[in-house]
Amino acid sequence: MIFGKKSSIGNVFYDVQCVEKEKKKSRSILRQLSQLSRRSIDSLSSTLSSPRTPSPRATFSDYPNPCELILLSALQAHVISGDDMRNCSTEIQSLTLSEKQKLVNFFKSDGDASGIIENNAFKAFNCSNLSSDLLKDEGAELLEQLWLKMNNLVIPTLQSMCFPLNEIDASFDVQTLILTAFRDRVLAKLLQDVDQEFPQLKSILLTILVETEEIPASLKTKIDICLGKNPSSSNTKPRYQKKIRSKTDSCLSSKRKSVSWMDDMQDNSRKSSTFCS
């Protein structure tokens, strides 16, 4: 009986040791997953940037906040729930001024947001370089689908989360920044060699003309071609030209007429002074 008790106690100790080993093993796995997750988050922005683009001034790795994944997902056109959007805006509101400024810089032209917008185009066209050849066949439809996602999903979602950034920069407008990034990083490259009209892109091009500023002259010329406008038409004379009357025109050049009348009081007749009709 005594030996039986010892053996049972030994089994208990053995079971406890096994449980402890399993706990340590699971903790180790969780620790490794956490480290891998952190690395992937920190390196995500840099991998999404174009290899030809210089290193941006501000990246998410500079300030690891819980809202960073939500913003990255929104930029990649993923659907964000209302609760996540509300939580993200609250977290942005609680950031320090320097952290908010870094987030503002993230969305500017030299930040990582522009690279993510370009990466969305790479995925849509299944390519690593944007060129005008991609607009052939079904390329215009792919561009239109990419535009609809950005204009109807990405921009409204970011607007609902990033409004606290207006407190430190009154000129911050995430819609204008995203549209400008799309213009410079996607549209300019797709239109660089176009020589024909694309009626299906009319709404996209008109929106870019209205909502963005400082459009490069070369891109403006390509947009006019896609809209069916002749860039050289501005140099031709108008078909009808309004005739401007000279200030020296007067009635002196017309024929003179004389009028005479009879005076009832006198028998003699008198001629009136000559005047112009």
Image (cartoon, rainbow, N blue to C red):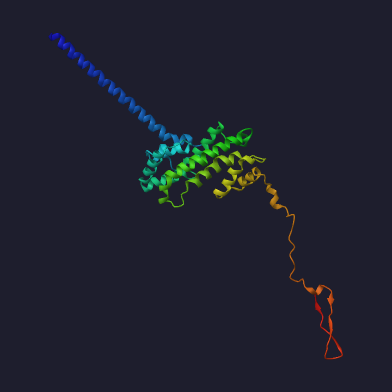
Name which quarter of the figure residue 251 lies in: bottom right
Vertically, is 216 above or below 9? below
Between 110 and 213, the residue placed more toward the observer is: 213
Outermost residue, right direction? 268
Q: Is residue 51 visible?
A: no
Front-most of residues 104 and 71: 71
Residue at 51% x, 40% y is 150
> Is 3 displayed left or right of 68 in the figure?
left
Task: State left or right for residue 171 relative to residue 126.
Answer: left
Query: For this rendering, which residue is in front, 181 or 201?
Result: 201
State whether residue 14 is above or below residue 232.
above
Q: Quadrant of the N terminus?
A: top left
Q: Residue at x 70, y 49 (%)?
A: 232
The residue most toward the left is 2
Q: Image quarter for residue 275?
A: bottom right
**Front residue (pair 210, 42):** 210
The image shows a total of numbered marks equal to 0
Q: Position of residue 260 (x, y in %)?
A: 84, 82
Residue 48 location, x and y as percent?
A: 48, 35
Residue 8 locus on image (x, y percent) = 18, 12
For residue 233, side relative to residue 3 (left or right):
right
Which of the image's four quarters has the C terminus? bottom right
Residue 240 x/y as whole percent: 74, 56
Q: Residue furthest bottom?
A: 266
Residue 68 visible in the current orientation = yes
